[in-house]
Amino acid sequence: MKFRFLFLFVLKLSLVSTQVLDSMVVKQVDSLIKVSRAFTDKRDFDKALEINVAAEKLTLEKFGRKSSEFSSCCANYGRVYHHKADYQEAEKWYLEAKDIREKVLGRQHPKYCVVLNNLAIVYGDMGNYEKAERLYLEAYDIFDKVIGKEHPTYAIILNGLSTLYLALGRYEEAEHFCIESKVLKEKSLGKEHPDYAICLNNLALIHEFMGNYKNVELN
């Protein structure tokens, strides 16, 4: 009886230690990805990739390829290559991140929607508007029906759709999503926030393309 109790106690300690170690590795990987993103923003792509390789190595050693952590490394590769305007590489890595997140986290998870948005932007930059629209609308539908419209990524999806439809000359649809974004930002951020002002400018631009000059002045 004492032996069994001791065995269970040691097993529990081992599980706790493993969880603590896993948590430490996750934090380390997240930290490396943040540093990589910072170098990407500075357009030091070689350094950004070098640091992401280190994050990838840690992730593969601890969690394997079919893990949420590895999907984050893939998504960051996509971000680096997107900023480099290497759209084919960006597409490849974002698709891998999408596939992993769909299997590991499910299609109703916010991180799945984030990679849909990023992939949609890539397709938009490639001129593949049909694929971009499909991904944006998939993410929009998930937020609308499952996650909720209060999530920060939802506003990003609205902006993406509005920008896409403006580029396609589908001004009424662009206006619809821009107005929804405006209402959301007014409610969550207030009229003094810079993001709200950007929304007004975008809406004014749409109205200008539509020839609604009175609305341009109002915005």
Image: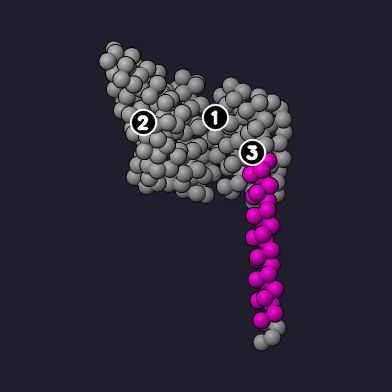
Q: Secondary structure at mark 2?
A: helix
Report x, y in % for residue 23. Answer: 64, 55
Residue range of the region highlighted in magenta in the rendering: 5-34
Which image quadrant: the N terminus? Answer: bottom right
**Label pair 1/2, CB-CB below 8 angstroms:** no
**Label pair 1/3, CB-CB below 8 angstroms:** no
Q: Which mark is residue 91?
A: 1
7 in relation to 67, above or below:
below
Q: Is residue 136 visible?
A: no
Q: Please tell me which residue lies in front, 163 or 135.
A: 163
Tag 1: amino acid: Glu
Mark nearest the camera among 1 and 2 is 2
Q: Quadrant of residue 173?
A: top left
Magenta-drawn stretch contains 17? yes
Report x, y in % for residue 107. Answer: 44, 45
Tag 2: amino acid: Lys
Q: Residues within 10 Å of mark 1 (few under 14, many from 20)?
A: many
Q: Residues within 10 Å of mark 2 (few under 14, many from 20)?
A: many
Q: Work out how far the residue at label 1 is from the one at label 2, CA to CA, in angstroms.
A: 30 Å
Name the residue: 66% across, 26% down: 42
Magenta-drawn stretch contains 219? no
Give the left or right position of residue 88, taking residue 174 as reference: right
**Residue bearing mark 2:** 182
Q: Which mark is residue 34?
A: 3
